[in-house]
Image: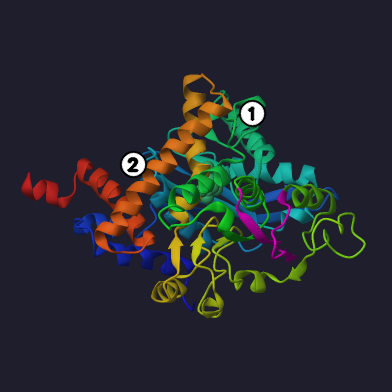
Amino acid sequence: MSDSLFADASRRLERALKYVSLSEDTIERLKYPKSSLIVSIPVRMDDGSLRIFQGYRVRYDDTRGPTKGGVRYHPKVSLDEVQSLAFWMTFKCAVLNLPFGGAKGGITLNPKELSKLELERLSRGYVDAIADFIGPDVDIPAPDVYTNPMIMGWMMDQYNIIKRQLSPSVVTGKPVTIGGSLGRETATATGAFFVIQTLLPKFKRIPSETTVAVQGFGNAGAELAELLWKAGYKVVAVSDSQGGIYAKQGLDIPSIRRLKDANKGIKDIYCEGSVCSNIIEHEILTNEQLLALDVDLLIPAALENQITEANVNDIKAKFVFEVANGPIDSAADLILETRGIQVIPDILVNAGGVTVSYFEWVQNRCGLYWTLEEVNQRLQHKMVEETEAIWKKSEELSVCMRTAAYVYGLHRLGAAMNAKGTRDYYVNG
Ligand code: GLU
């Protein structure tokens, strides 16, 4: 992929535009982010020195409501990446019919190098820098890669200090004790699980005869691997940034999770002499090898651009469920399609996270809190309903699930833009 991530992300939109009649105004507006903020965040480090970090917040489109999206802490965060992620959030919220537009934020850093106090000062500094850009009715941050409820709690607190008011709904994914929703931490995985369960019968498969490989053993990947394992799927391989493990007969996911928490890396878990060498015979794999496994379901749950022109011909899975945002670039996408490998897109598969964020925002605003059962029931209802609709759309138009999802989102975005008044509206009305 030679051009920017954003240019590549927009290519998906171009493919879908063929199937929707939208006004030129709408198409033109969707090509550009509404506003992008770049900030420098000075942080006093524990040794007394001062470090300046670069942060971003992009509000892509707010036609359907306040903008919504996570904040990523990662060394590769750039304006290009944040704009692409904000673009995907716009479509994700439209696909799930949430009353939100799309946004995203990020800070370029390796969070593992900072102490907890440095991380807190950085997170509060980020909110100081973007406080006029966000708000419960404007733009609502949430967790993403390497951010978590604790960081969201600091962010909410800092915003409330600045504004001298208590607005829990300015941030979602907070700890439950200060207004977070039950089920938010596991929502991305739970949502993806509902999508897989809805589609499996359409693919004429049953869990016990379905093999799965999961790339990425973070919040979403590990939880999803366990949900699939519990439902009887054969999860044969998992990996994290350090490498992976494979066992033909299936892995025991709960024990891997427990040991990963204790030992940190997946690769360390089953190594010789490790505490669980008695569990299952296994092989050690690289991430590249995991992606090339001959499995039924491949689940990239790490970062963008994992499947590109360079390795797409190695992919042997029958179905790819994108739990990460943008794990396949547009060139690889076309090749997978011609090879008959079905891809279920990120803007549907990982939308459970933002859906429960929406539930959290609703609960904060009405001051009435739901049980975990209620949250999961509502999540299931939304995920199943939209998955069925996108499946139907893909059959109706004979297009892949990704294009169907974009078409579906575009209808909602286009209708909202029209309702606010486009050129067509003035000329015809
Ligand atoms: N970061 C998550 C995503 O990419 C969740 C965003 C949110 O909850 O607002 O969908």
Asked whether mark 2 lies closer than 8 Å to ligand 1, one says no
Residue flagged by tag 2: what amino acid is it?
Arg
167 versus 98 height, above or below: above
Q: Report x, y in % for residue 118.
A: 77, 46
Residue flagged by tag 1: what amino acid is it?
Val
Q: Report x, y in % for residue 328.
A: 50, 67
Of residues 308 and 314, which is closer to you in this image? 314
Q: Is 319 on the left-hand or right-hand side of 337? A: right
| Span shown in magenta | 232-253
Say which residue appears at 29% left-offset and 48% top-offset: 413
Say which residue appears at 45% left-offset and 63% top-offset: 343
Q: Marks 1 and 2, Cα distance to the nearest angstrom?
A: 27 Å
Residue pointed to by mark 1: 176
Element class at badge 2 = loop
Q: Which mark is residue 359?
A: none
User: Badge 1: how crowded within 10 Å, few (<14), some, or many (20+)?
Assistant: some
Taking the magenta stretch, the answer to whether it contains residue 233 is: yes
Q: Is 92 on the left-hand or right-hand side of 426? A: right
89 versus 303 height, above or below: above
Instruction: Write down the quadrant of residue 415 in the picture.
Output: top left
Taking the magenta stretch, the answer to whether it contains residue 139 is: no
Say which residue appears at 44% left-offset and 52% top-offset: 201
Residue pointed to by mark 2: 64
Of residues 91 and 215, which is closer to you in this image? 215
Element class at badge 1 = helix
Of residues 199 and 76, which is closer to you in this image? 199
Q: Report x, y in % for residue 119.
A: 73, 46
